[in-house]
Every structure is written in C-alpha cells, then in structure tokens.
Amino acid sequence: MKKSIWIFLLAVLLPSIALGWLALRSAEEQQIILEKRTAELYQTETENAATAARALIDGERRAFNEVVRQLLTDRDPQKLANTFSTELAKEWQRKAIGFALGKEGQICAPPPKQAASNPEWSKFLLGNGAWLAGTTPATVYWVSGNELNRPEQLRQKRGGNYDVQQSAQPQAANQKEQAASEPAGKDAPPAEKSAGFNQSDTGDNKQTLARNVEPQQVFNTAALSQLMSSTADFRALTSDTNEGVITRFVQDQLDIIFWLRPAQAPEMVFGCLIDSDNLRDLWPAALRTQEENTGSRYASRSQPEFVLALLDDKARPIATQPPGEAGRDWKRPFVASEIGEALPHWEAALYLQRPEQVRESAKALRRTLTFLIATALGAIACGGWLVVADARRQLALAQQKTDFVSNVSHELKTPLTSIRMFAELMQNGNGTTAKHPQYLRIIMVEAERLTRLINNVLDFAGLERKQKRFEKKPLDLHAVIGRAWEGHALHLQESGFSTRWEAAPAPYPVVGDEDALAQILVNLLSNAEKYAGERKEVELHTYLDGAHVCVSVLDRGCGVHDGEERKIFEAFYRAHDSLSSGIQGSGLGLTLAQRLAHEHGGEITYQPREGGGSNFTLRLPLAKQLPIV
C-alpha cells in the first residue's frame, strides 16, 4: 500500500505539479506576448493614420504642381515667375504665398520692391528671403516628392552639401517657448530654436529630440523621435531633385513649403508656403479613412474601443475619431506614430477607452489557465484519493477473502469431523445400539449444516457471476414459512431454544422462488441460533404492512455493535471471527439473504431488539392475488 502511494506521488502528482508550475510561468510570458501583440495591432492603426495624413499632404503638393504646370502651358516661365504670387492666388483656392526663384537663384516672386505694400509678402521675405536666396542656412525637414508617402520614418539623405542631424533627447520646454517669442534672424534661424536644436550642433555633432508624446507601449528603449533634420540653404536642398516638401519652424509656427522644377524651365523653382493652420480642413479626412478601414469595430460597438487623434507639434488634438473627444491626457497615448518630415513632430495617436483592458485580457487568460491547472491538479488528487481508497478496499476485501477461506475451512472441518467420528463409532461397534439413532441424527444434522454451507457458497458465487436462475411464480409465503419453520424450530428446541411464531392470518401472496425464500428464512434463523448467547430464545413474527409482508426473526443474543449495521450485509464481513470467538460462520449468510431479498424486490433490515438482542426483518412486496387452483 505504501509503495503504491509513493509511486503515485513520484510518478503522477509531483510531475503534474511541476507541469502546472511551468504552465503558469508560460502564462506570464504569454501575458507579455499578448500585450505586445495587442500594442502592435493598435500601432498599425496609428501608422495607417500617419500614412493617410502624409497622403493628404502629398495630394496638396500634387495639386500645387498641377496648377504650376497649367500656368506654364501658355505663359513664358520668366514672366510667370515675376507675377507668380499673384497668379497662384487666383488659380489655387488654398491660401498660400507663392514664390519663384530665377535661373541664378534670385527671388523673382514675391517681388521685393512690391513687398512693402503687402504685409504678408513682407513677412514671408523677412523670414525666408535669405534662406531661399542661399545666403543663410536654416534647420529644416526635407523630403523629396517620390519619398513623401513612404511608410519609413527614418530616411537618410545621401549627397548634397548639407549636414544631417538625428533626433533624440528633448531640450527644455521653456527653450521652445523662448524661441517662439524671438524674431527670426540671420544669426539664429527660428527653425533651430523652435525645434530645440543647438546652433553649434552641425556637421558631425548630432543631436536628437524626444517625441512630444510618451506612448505607454513603445518598442524601442525610449520614446525618441526618428525624424532627421537638415541644416542647409534652400538651393542646396533642391539641387538634386525636381520636386518635394520642406518644413521648418519659424517663430514656433510650422510652415510647409511645396516646390517644383517644371520641365519647361528646369533651372527655375516655383513654390509656395502654407501655414499649417490653413490645412486644418484636411485632417478629419485622414481619420475618416481609418474609420472606413476599421468600420466593423465602430459598427459592432455602441462605443468604440479606442480613440484616434492627430496631434500637432504641441501635442494638441487637431482632429479626433470619434469627433469631439476631449478631456484626455493627450501626451500619454497607448501607442503613437510620427507622421514624418512632412509634418515634423506631429503624431497619430491612439487612446484606449478602457486603458486597463489589455492587462485585464491578459490577466483573464492567466486566471483561466490557473483555474484549468488547479482543476486538473484537483482531478488528479481526487483520482489519487479514489485509487488509494479503492486499493485499501481491495486490500480489505483480500483480507476478508483470506479470512473467509479460513472460516469456511473451519466450518467444513467441524461437521466432517463429527460425521466421521460418529460413523466410526457405529462401524466399530463402540457404544450401545440404543445410541445409534442419536448418532444418526447428529450425522444428519451435521450433513445438513455442511450442505447449507456449501449451498451458500455456490449460490453466492452464482449471484456474483449473475448466473443464478430463479423459478419465480405466485405462491403463499405463509406456507413456505411454515414448512421452513417446522423443521428448524424442532432443531432449535432440541438445542435448548425456546421458540415462538406469531403469525398474522394467511395468506401472504407473493411472486418468488420458493427455495430461495426458504433459504432466506433458514439463514436468518441460523444466524439467530449462532449469536444467541446464553439466552436461548428465538421468535418469528409475520405480519402485513400495507402492500408488503414482513417476516421478523428475533433473538436475545449479543446484537450488532454501533456502526456495523450496514457492514454485516457486506460479503465476507464478520463482526465476530469464528476462529477467535468460537462462533461458527462464513460471513456469507446475511449477504446471501440480502441479495436474494433484492432479487425478489425486497430487503432485509436490522434493528436492535428492545431488552437486548437483534431483530432482522425481511420485507417483500405483496402480489395482487394467488392463482385459483
């Protein structure tokens, strides 16, 4: 038994606990993976929104290029360059300041001589004239036309005579505010101050900027900007390509510049400057595109699971989806993507309606796995307990069978010894002839006891294998009881017992096997005889109880100990061992009687008898009536 328990612990339970622990460790890793995959999924949303925003800028650039080409279809390039600012305002609905550079790089439009009468032209030339003319470099963000809408955020410029700077850690916020309040000048270009660049950081000295937002889920070591700025003049930036977009911060204001070298005059440059505030009507379209791409999410929920927003360089929302969202910490999105050099330091950001939902989903997965592991371990422990309990039961049953063999051997030996002894006495002529009838009666009684014991064993074996066959028929149980009582009562009286039968008026109609019913009664009477003790008294009571007939066998013996009322009906169980107590028996009498009773739809119950002793009652269902003979 102990060996089996150790085998179960070492081979089943401990490996199961180890596997459960490993599964929980795996669940923690799965939680991290789930959070990362969820963040990557949402990151795709922001990247798509950033792509849509770049596509809108590119659409405006293409619209500007188309206007320039149309103006050049019937005009001389040089004449158009001198009046380009005015002509662009007439032909293009977008509010912008057009400019044109001549073959030598001189500013043809807006005409410097007429700028004094136009405040917008004057301001444009003051902030951009020296840079456009190539006399003063400035820190700008530059992208060619064919690269504008590429998804890559990091573009390395090769060639040209300008320096490239990579962005990383931010300058203090008050530096940006100070730059916004200072006018642009030759010594300190507004773009450098407003973007947080140090004037001395040129050439190989590279400086990086932090992003304006701090995403809760980032896939790099820090939320650093991946944009690259360029410190150069306009002519250096535009010398190798024919079209593109340049953005720069002037007095803390983002200016977007579209430029084109037309095929009709490749040595000239036509461009326009647009204040980012004048493009506010574009941005809702970028988020509407995202709504169409993820329409099922919005349609399947009364409230969407996230909010998309476009943030400007000050991390202020300029468009949201759903519209009208407010009251959020816009600098702390769940994920965010930079739009790119076309809109530097602008972000497409995503905010969860329930920020805790990702972690809750991961925790729910871990709780489910923990519950399943606990359930499995519980099932294993329960199964182990059942195995141990069954093993103990089998061991007890094996011990009972061993005791049964010993008891049966003793039971068989006792009557055989008596039969042999008295047979030898009669054969040898020992004793008087007058005692021969007594010897014969003892031999007959012992032979009947031996036959009853053998029949019990055989009947029990037949019931165990379900091979016992009964010849059930309608009969009067009173007559069956009378025949069995007549023979056994005489035996009891000869053994010194007082007997009495109290019977209700017959008949007792039942359906059953006569021999099996008689065997039940004989086993109960034999049980009363064996456990009678010193008070040799056996009574038989038969009576009707509703739709049942009851047969009670009462004695004045030692009774049954508390807690053993059900065990006495188990196979091979004996409250008193025959080898140690001297009470003969095999442990099958009551078991066989109970099973025979069940085969007839009845049962045998035990009750302690008032005044001492036992009361075993056979309860059988009555039949409707006996057949008429």
Image (tube, rainbow, N blue to C red):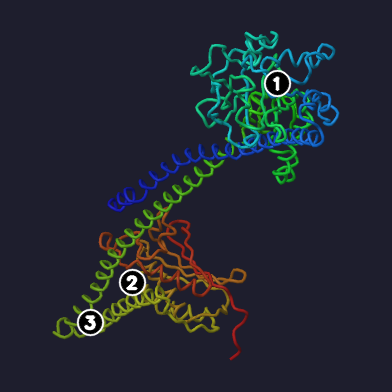
Q: Nearer the viewer, residue 121 or 400?
A: 121
| Image side of residue 533 versus residue 625, left or right | left
What residue is disc 1 on?
254
Question: Does residue 504 lie above or below 435 as drawn?
Answer: above
The percent coordinates of residue 224 (x first, y second) are 55, 24
Residue 351 appears in view? no
Front residue of 471 and 78: 78
Look at the numbered discs 3 and 2 and tell me whether their residues touch, using CB distance below 8 Å. Answer: no
The three-letter amino acid code for the residue at tag 1 is Leu
Q: First in sequence: mark 3 or mark 2?
A: 3
Q: Position of residue 81 (x, y in %)?
A: 77, 25
Residue bearing mark 3: 435
Q: Quadrant of residue 196?
A: top right
Q: In 3D space, how far apart are the residues under numbered discs 3 and 2 (Cα atoms)?
A: 18 Å
SS class of the residue under badge 3? helix
Seen in the picture, residue 593 relative to 82 is either above or below; the reply is below
Q: Secondary structure at mark 1?
A: strand
